[in-house]
Image (tube, rainbow, N blue to C red):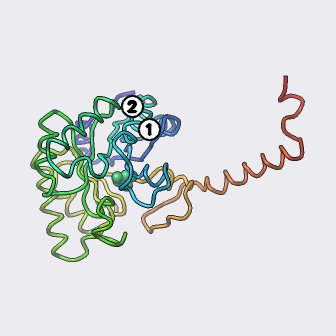
Amino acid sequence: YKRVTVKSLIDMKQSGEKISMLTAYDYTMAKIVDGAGIDVILVGDSASNVMAGHETTLPITLDQMIYHASSVIRAIDRSLVVVDLPFGTYQSDPKEALRSAIRIMKESGGHAVKLEGGKEIKESIKRILNAGIPVMGHLGLTPQSIYKFGTYTVRAKEEEEAKQLISNAKMLEKIGCFAVVLEKIPAELAKQVADELTIPVIGIGAGNGVDGQVLVLHDMIGMTHEFNPRFLRRYMNLYEDMTTAISQYVDDVKSVSFPNENEQY
Ligand code: KIV
Ligand code: NA
């Protein structure tokens, strides 16, 4: 295998090879995802929803993100591992942002961090980049700002917000981010941003005119089943398959058909 680096992602954009990215939050899942050939693993703060059952991404802590990220890191041979800086660990000032990013890098062994936002956090991103830590940006529907938006609907449909998004994306490239995630914005706008930037633009609900795609693993394998946005393609229905398997096990235990003669000592 050849390790994926921030440099290889930029090369992929230049050669027109699309970038594949999925989330993972634990060792066992990350091992499967890495082994299947994914380019980038995101230890997303969506762990707050998927792993901990919170309604939003806001409650997850830096210590919890480090726990998830270190578990993922122990599993991977090839993928680039990007770790979300959670809400409240980078917004108040650049020094705090750098301290948080350093903790992620030192304590988890992650390869890069991702932060949500544009101009508001420019100085924080610069500070992190200056320490040699690669930064991925995240614009559009940024879930840490859900209480500002009030809804999970598509962002940047109006011209003003679209212009802001384009200028923020350009700024992120200019200060040195290695890639940007665009979440839930019109496909046409996302394509325009991808065309105008030389760094890779990874979309989720942003159409196919971008340089790569990211999904939440548990959604794409159909382990979750209540979340059904249009952009989500489910490749399996693990919710159903697991329910069937587990009820079968329950039946087998009750009927004493498990364990059988060969399954005991
Ligand atoms: O936390 C996450 O899973 C993310 C992706 C949806 C981009 O940030
Ligand atoms: Na996230």
Q: Which residue is mark 2?
A: 78
Secondary structure at badge 1 equals loop
Specify whether 83 is left or right of 49.
left
Specify whether 232 is left or right of 159.
right
Q: Which residue is mark 1?
A: 37
Q: Amino acid at mark 1?
A: Gly
- Quadrant for residue 129, please give it: top left
Front residue of this view, candidates 1 and 141: 141
Expressed as whole percent of the image width and height from the top left, the position of residue 243 reads 69, 54
Which residue is found at the position 84% from the left and 39% from the top? 258
As drawn, 125 above or below 209: above
Front residue of this view, candidates 150 and 218: 150
Q: Dot 2: within a 10 Å radius of its alpha carbon, few (fewer than 14), some, or many (20 or more) residues? A: some
Which residue is found at the position 10% from the left and 48% from the top? 123
- Which of the marked residues, 1 or 2, is nearer the chain's N terminus? 1
Q: Is residue 214 visible?
A: no
Which residue is found at the position 27% from the left and 46% from the top? 114
| Mark-to-mark CA distance, 1 and 2 | 8 Å
Q: Amino acid at mark 2?
A: Arg
